[in-house]
Image: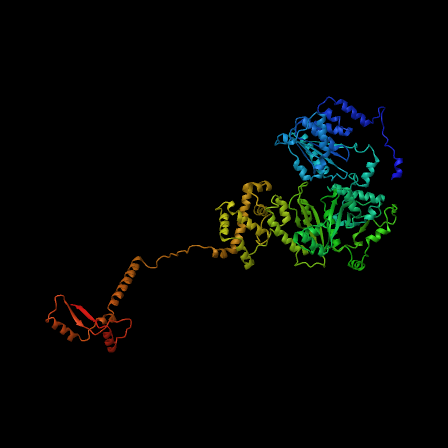
Amino acid sequence: MYCHMKNITAVPVQEDSEGLSEAERELRNLKEQLNEDFPVGPLIRKCCTLDQGKAVITFLDAILDKTLRSTVALLAARGRGKSAALGLAIAGAVAAGYSNIYVTAPSPENLKTLFDFVCKGFAMLEYKYILPHEHEKLSQVELLVVDEAAAIPLPVVRSLLGPYLVFLASTVNGYEGTGRSLSLKLLQQLEEQSRMSKSADNALSGRLFKKIELSESIRYASGDRIEQWLNALLCLDVTNTIPSIRRLPQPGDCDLYYVNRDTLFSYHKDSELFLQRMMALYVASHYKNSPNDLQLMADAPAHHLFVLLGPVDESENRLPDILCVIQVCLEGKITQESAKRALKEGRQPFGDQIPWKFSQQFADDVFPSLSGARIVRIATHPSAMRMGYGSAAVELLTRYFEGQLTQLSEVETEDALETPQVNVTEAAEKFSLLEENITSRTDLPPLLVPLRERRPERLHYLGVSFGLTLDLFRFWRKHKFAPFFIGNAPNSVTGEYTCMVLKALKNDDVEAAGSDEWGFYGPYHREYKRRLVELLGSTYRKMNYRLAMSVFDPKINFVEQDPTASASSEFLNFMKFVLEPHEMKRLEAYSNSLIDYPLIRDVAQKLARVYFLEYLPVSLSYAQASLLLCYGLQHKDIPEIEGEMNLESQQILSLFMKVMKRLCKYLNNLTSKELDATVSRLKAIKMEPHAISVDEDLHDAAKKVQDEMKAKSEGLLDPELIQQFAIVDREADFENALRNGGGKIVPGGVISVKSNKFKLGKHSEPETEKSGKKRNKNHSGLKSSKKMRR
């Protein structure tokens, strides 16, 4: 290279007598014409090219119009002064009286040039810099400036647009460019809306749109071949290399081919054109491309390229149309010792994203030893999007790695041939970069290899890592990819969660438990769903309900059956643990419209967890299940759900009532007897009518009382009780008693007759004469006498 430096000549430029080119002369005339205009004149003097001057004038025209309904987009390649023009326009907006100006970009690094020229514009307008904290912030936006808009996701850029002046700027090529979604989608939509507003009656309320493109370079001289060489070498300017597709075949008629990278990067004329077209699809698919990405494609050992082509007519001497490009990276085959050590140390080594993240999520040291492939990029031709070509490419790639596209005999034959191990040190000693002769190769293999002619790597799974959006997730879910990781916080630049999905391939090396459609990943998938149920109320509370429903993918359609027939005792015990009897009563009360919904919020949250874990086989509509997820799992209030689901509050409450009624009905049929048995309550008094009349009842009661009195009186005349008053020899003793009284009864009417009978004690048998004498002996002062009243 150094030997050719002396032959470098300046780029020829047509100059006039003053040494100015035509563009430079026009720029000077423009500056002279606008010299007295404020603020245009001072700002134009800082412009370096005519294109840049015209861009600044267009920006200032929109600023001075002050309708706050214009959108101006500036598109340019690298080094055209795009950010400088934005900075000068912002300075002009401040001079025009705009007090609230918002500036946004993917990162502060992208705004260095912009703010540099904002300060230069202020200097030209004789403004002094004021620190941000020295003035009060106002609540309304008058001007929004978005730099490097293509690096921001399209939905985010669209959400930034509003009833204020908007300036957009984006690099459409170069390693700062990130794709053409901005120009292909958003700008076309804005241009169409502007055209419709001009033709409609409400032209004053519609948005205006203007587009500016910069082509004259500031970083390079006009027509500098170094810029052309750099763009061609690093595939920076590939937006114009996307050819139109001659015909769109059926996706089922297309084939997937393996791309030989040695031939692709051989700098052959056809290979170079094919590479440019592949990179053009990456750019069109909104991938951010840098020279490092190109280097990975070229020589990274673990990376492989595949392209989807239609039926190829070999008689035509032309490159086939590329419908889809897939770039994969082989991962895994990590020793179990390394996995255990990484888990013990709590670190995630660089590379092998899927194995390390999976091992970290499930504390599994076996999964990293499996082999897999991560789909790094998949890009479809912009004219063939949403036509099934991406799905066809993923299906063919899956079948290829499962060995369905290659004959088994061929695979077994090649498995027997082991690839010899190469010693890197010995190989490096044989070759030297200083002695390498860089020449075009003539013995190159074919650029495209049919998959049936190439031995597939033996893999156990396919994985993908991407920014979580609804459309992307639905695409991978359609192909049986299941999530195992979602980041805890959205990306600060894109506002998207990082998501990793996995698909188990049919392989005899791994035993799958049961006949789950997820293969060996089935148990992990169920565990992740249980984890997701708990995280939806905290980490993912702000996630859109549609995205949450797609990620969770709940089963909401069940076969109608008798609940008591399918419920086991274990499930009944589980439900008793989840739902208390009084909570069930509250649910019944709400179902009968006796209480309001806030009183059963805790019950709804419990039922939502049980339902989404598929313990309650109750069929719900998509809207009802979505409402249950929002209210029960994400713990959102009714006003939040109202704005997110775009429904009135009465509609939401009506849906919620239907959900609770269905769940309550199922639980009542299932556990009503068990719940009733556990509820403590007062004993009920059972009252029955009399079988007889009142008179008969009174007569029976009187007879009962008379019988009781008769039995009591008869008990007083008990012979045993009277026996204690008996006199053995009545006549003799009585006569003696009268004789002692003079034959007359004493005035008191009481005479004393001696008796030899003792009272009956505890023993019923009478005492003998012997025992009586003994008692009289022991108690000499005791006499038994009876008094009889006559």
Q: Position of residue 298 (x, y in %)?
A: 80, 46
**Residue toward you, 650 or 569:** 569
Relative image position of residue 328 (x, y in whole percent): 75, 49
- Seen from the viewer's position, the closer of residues 166 and 453 is 166
Q: How is the protein colored in the picture?
A: rainbow
Residue at point 67% right, 42% down? Answer: 491
**Viewport quadrant of the C terminus:** bottom left
Residue 759 seen in this snapshot: yes
The answer to whether 19 is drawn above or below residue 524 in the figure is: above
In the rendered image, the vertical position of residue 603 relative to residue 193, given as above or below: below
Q: Nearer the viewer, residue 629 or 1?
A: 1
Q: Is residue 30 above or below residue 235?
A: above
Quadrant position of the N terminus in the picture: top right
Residue 13, position in %: x, y? 85, 29
User: For this view, does 106 lie left or right of residue 712?
Assistant: right
Q: How many marks?
A: 0
Residue at the image point whose x is 65% and y is 34% from the top: 162
Residue most extreme to the bottom: 770
Looking at the image, can residue 247 be seen? no
Q: Position of residue 221 (x, y in %)?
A: 82, 32
Task: Judge by depth and name the residue closer to the eye, 395 or 460.
Answer: 460
Please report the residue visible at 87 percent of the width from the left and 50 percent of the height from the top: 443
